[in-house]
Image (cartoon, rainbow, N blue to C red):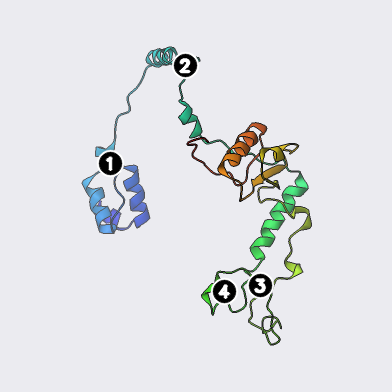
Amino acid sequence: MTGEYETMTVPELKDLLRERGLKVGGNKAELIARLMDNPDSDETESTPVVSDVEVEDFDDDFDDEFDDDDDFFEDDDWDNIHTARQKPVLDEETAKALAFRAQQKKKQPAFRRQEWYRYKRLSRSSWRKPNGLQSKMRLNRKYRPPMVRIGYRKISSARGLHPSGFEEVLVHNQNDLEGLDPETQAVRIGARVGNRKRLDIHDKANSLGIRVLNQRKIVRKGDL
């Protein structure tokens, strides 16, 4: 049996160990030794058989214990349950435009600022148009980083849309949610909105079925 294990690869040995419920750490020699110490016959377990009568009795007891009127979940437990986010209703043309825009983005180069490799502060800053009479980057010399041009612009039919397909709408209070279409529009809360107004926007958006793109978890405490 040892010779058979020697011809196997490490991933194959680890698969055998997982099937037997053993640890998969260590080198090949340790894996083989662990397999030799724990043969197949020792790992088999008998599965108890439950009769139909026992199952029916258990279901009846479960239904009697938890009626429809009982509160099976506490209020705090409902907050931890994952809810799927809203998805936009897209037509076929918009869906194709979003997929094509994603392909365009993969081909787009990373635009670097002039002399980004020389100064650390420039490597962290965004792209700026190169200036200077003798700037090699501005003159489009060879082996220089590419500059932002109109040719890198994305498809016009998907321009301004969120990657999910929603049309973004900037809101600052819950009154801005009036008249929005939850199937095609999603909201983004302003950065300077406080937690009190942000919670009001969250509650109203959830009641209207509108997706909040930058929704974050806020601990309600005090007068919130």
- Asked if residue 183 lies left or right of residue 9, the reply is right
What amino acid type is highlighted by mark number 1?
Asp
Compared with 66, 82 (above or below) is below
Secondary structure of the residue carrying numbered label 1: helix
Q: Earlier in the sequence, mark 1 or mark 4?
A: 1
- Between circles 3 and 2, the one closer to the viewer is 3
Tell me the residue that label 1 is attached to: 40
> Outermost residue toward the left?
37
**Can you identify the residue that label 2 sits on?**
70
Q: Is residue 137 above or below residue 28?
A: below
Q: Position of residue 39 (x, y in %)?
A: 25, 43
Closer mark to the observer between disc 4 and disc 2: 4
Residue 73: x and y in percent read 46, 25
- Amino acid carrying label 2: it is Asp
Q: Which residue is mark 3?
A: 128
For label 3, count other residues whose C-alpha is less than 10 Å away and answer few (under 14), some (14-19) or many (20+): few
Of labels 2 and 1, earlier in sequence is 1
Please, which residue is most extreme toward the bottom here?
134
| Left/right of residue 2 with respect to residue 76 in the rendered view | left
Q: Secondary structure at mark 4?
A: helix
Q: Residues within 10 Å of mark 4 (few under 14, many from 20)?
A: some
The answer to the question of whether label 3 and label 4 lie on touching residues, with beta carbons closer than 8 A, is no
198 or 66, which is in the foreground? 198
Q: Nearer the viewer, residue 175 or 91?
A: 175
For image coordinates 62% across by 74% down, the residue present is: 113
Specify few, some or many for label 1: CA neighbours under 10 Å numbering under 14, 14-19, or 20 or more. Answer: few
Q: Pick the residue in front: 42 or 88.
A: 88
Vertical order, 79 against 92 (above or below): above
Q: Nearer the viewer, residue 69 or 165?
A: 69
**Residue matched to label 4:** 122
Disc with the residue nearer the chain's start (3 vs 4): 4
> Please, what secondary structure does the residue beneath circle 3 have?
loop
